[in-house]
């Protein structure tokens, strides 16, 4: 049995996502070799680069501050109103191998909007480490609501991601920094080869700086799945 978090390796990614991604595709195999990533910055350090650099994937990259036609990186602010049309205009097929979303804001809502139409085999999302393991929290769905200085509350907790995706995706890895979560679509997952599938207690990784944070339980409403309290009281790091 393979415990994916033990295969972390940093080549192009921020943490050890490269090694985990490679091991996942060793197990499930490649399909159409198409990857999509939203929130790549320049593309130098991102989750999907290992696939288009080393495995000849066709990449579709989006970022609100960077553009580079050489790597098919488009400068665009992805939101709930335009994400599906961006995919359609880019001729991204309904099913593709890999999706990563990391826009430090309404990632949760963007991912669930994409999944109303598209079916990536492997999904990578960012859980915000300000939330504790037991917190089931999703914050704003509107970028205009996010503060720009001094406050660092956005995105979704690991448990919220796990609960909201469990009908269609298997949770297979939380990389060792406690940030990025990996999911594999249930219909193509080879359960017998990966350890701890959907065992949240086993796979969850606490962020190394979590001791500096305070649980949100007494500051905002805990929610499960895609329901969210959108207007919570914000707080600074302690």
Image: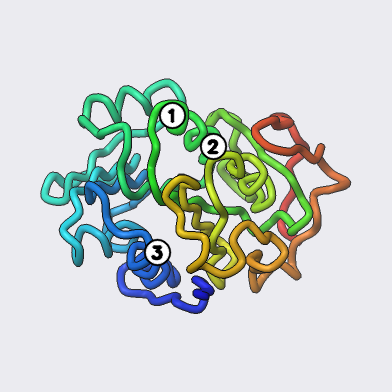
Q: Residue furthest left?
A: 70
Do we see residue 13 in this rendering? no
Q: Residues within 10 Å of mark 1 (few under 14, many from 20)?
A: some
Q: Secondary structure at mark 2?
A: loop
SS type, badge 1:
loop
Question: From the viewer's perspective, is the residue at label 3 or at label 1 nearer?
Answer: 3
Q: Which mark is residue 79?
A: 1
Residue drawn at (20%, 54%) of the image: 57
Alpha-carbon span between mark 1 and mark 2: 8 Å
Considering the numbered disc 3 on the image, is that residue within a helix, a strand or a loop?
helix
Q: Tell me if 142 is positioned left or right of 222 in this view.
A: left
Q: Are marks 1 and 2 in contact (CB under 8 Å)?
A: yes
Residue pointed to by mark 3: 24
> In the displayed image of the protein, which residue is found farthest to the front?
192
Specify whether residue 120 is in view.
yes
Left or right: residue 66 compared with residue 21:
left
- For label 2, the residue is 106
Percent x, y for residue 215?
A: 80, 55
Q: Which residue is found at the position 53% from the left and 57% from the top? A: 181
Measuring from the top left, give residue 23's x and y in whole percent: 38, 70
Q: Tell me which numbered mark, 1 or 2, is placed earlier along the sequence.
A: 1
Give the image location of residue 206, x and y in percent: 67, 68
Please give left or right for residue 191 compared with residue 233 in the image.
left
Q: Nearer the viewer, residue 41 or 81?
A: 81
Q: CA distance from mark 2 to mark 3?
A: 26 Å
Which image quadrant: the C terminus? bottom right
Q: Earlier in the sequence, mark 2 or mark 3?
A: 3
Of circles 2 and 3, the one toward us is 3
Q: Residue at x 43, y 32 (%)?
A: 114
Above or below: residue 160 compared with residue 182: above
| Displayed quadrant of residue 211 | bottom right
Q: Residue furthest right?
A: 218
């Amino acid at each position: 049995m393979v415990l994916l978090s033990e295969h972390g390796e940093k080549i192009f990614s921020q943490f050890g996502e490269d090694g985990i991604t490679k091991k996942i595709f060793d197990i499930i195999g490649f399909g159409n070799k198409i990857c999509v990533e939203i929130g790549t910055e320049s593309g130098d350090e991102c989750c999907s680069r290992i696939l288009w650099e080393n495995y000849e994937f066709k990449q579709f990259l989006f970022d609100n501050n960077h553009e580079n036609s050489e790597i098919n990186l488009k400068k665009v602010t992805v939101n709930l109103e335009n994400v599906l049309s961006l995919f359609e205009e880019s001729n991204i097929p309904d099913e593709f191998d890999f999706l990563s979303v990391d826009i430090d804001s309404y990632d949760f809502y963007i991912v669930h909007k994409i999944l109303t139409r598209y079916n990536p085999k492997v999904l990578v999302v960012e859980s915000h480490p300000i939330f504790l393991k037991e917190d089931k929290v999703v914050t704003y769905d509107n970028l205009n609501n996010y503060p720009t200085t001094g406050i660092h509350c956005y995105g979704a907790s690991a448990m919220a991601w796990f609960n909201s995706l469990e009908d269609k995706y298997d949770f297979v890895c939380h990389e060792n920094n406690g940030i990025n979560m990996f999911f594999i679509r249930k219909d193509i997952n080879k359960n017998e080869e990966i350890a701890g599938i959907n065992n949240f207690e086993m796979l969850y990784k606490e962020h190394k700086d979590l001791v500096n944070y305070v649980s949100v339980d007494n500051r905002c409403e805990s929610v499960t799945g895609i329901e969210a309290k959108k207007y919570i009281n914000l707080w600074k790091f302690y």
